[in-house]
Amino acid sequence: MVLKRYTFSNLSENSQRFVVAFFHLISSLAETFVFIYMGFDIAMEKHSWSHVGFIFFTILFIVIARLRSKVEGKKKWLQMFFSCGYLVNLVWPANRQIPIKHQKALWYSGLRGVTTFALALQSGHKLPDGHGQTIFT
C-alpha cells in the first residue's frame, strides 16, 4: 500500500485488477467487522435517555452540517469544522482545549463511524455526572 505509487504501474493489467479488487475486499471486510462490533456494543450497552433534547439537536445539527457541506463543497466543510473547534475551545478550560494538531487529525479522519464511536465510548468513562453516557447514546 505504501509503495503503490511506484509499483502499481509495473504490474500487468490482470495483476492490477486483482490488487484493486483484493484491497477493496479487505477494506469492506474490515468495515463490516467494525460495524458488527459497533452493533453488538450498542445493543449490549446501557443507554441514558435523560437528555433527549440534546440528542435530538445533535442529530439535527449533524444533518444540517452534512447538507451544507454537500451544497457548498469541501472548502466550506473545512472552515466549518475548525470554527466549531475554535468555539469549543472558547468554552472549555485551558487544560481541556482541543489542540490544533488534534483538530487536524479529527478533520483528516472525518469523524466518520468508527472514530466517532470510539470518541463517544471514551466520553462515557471520562465525563462526570452521566454526561458521557448521554453523548454515547
Image (spheres, rainbow, N blue to C red):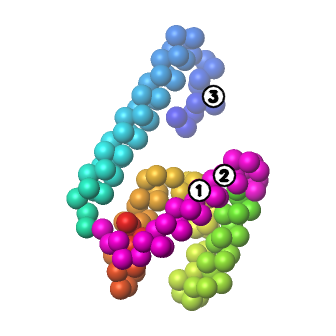
Residue 8 place in picture, x, y as percent: 59, 23
Position of the C terminus, as image quadrant, is bottom left
Residue 33 place in picture, x, y as percent: 33, 42
Residue 103 place in picture, x, y as percent: 61, 66
Residue at 58% x, 80% y: name it.
97
Q: Disc 3 marks which residue?
A: 6
Q: Disc 1 marks which residue?
A: 63
Q: Depth check: 2 or 51 in front?
A: 51
**Magenta residues, dominant SS class:** helix
Q: CA distance from mark 3 to mark 1?
A: 40 Å
**Amino acid under disc 2:** Leu
Q: Which residues are magenta?
A: 47-76
Q: Earlier in the sequence, mark 3 or mark 1?
A: 3
The image quadrant of residue 109 is bottom right
**Amino acid under disc 3:** Tyr
Q: Depth check: 94 or 11 in front?
A: 94
Asked whether the viewer can see residue 122, the reply is: no
Q: Are marks 2 and 1 in contact (CB under 8 Å)?
A: yes
Q: Secondary structure at mark 2?
A: helix
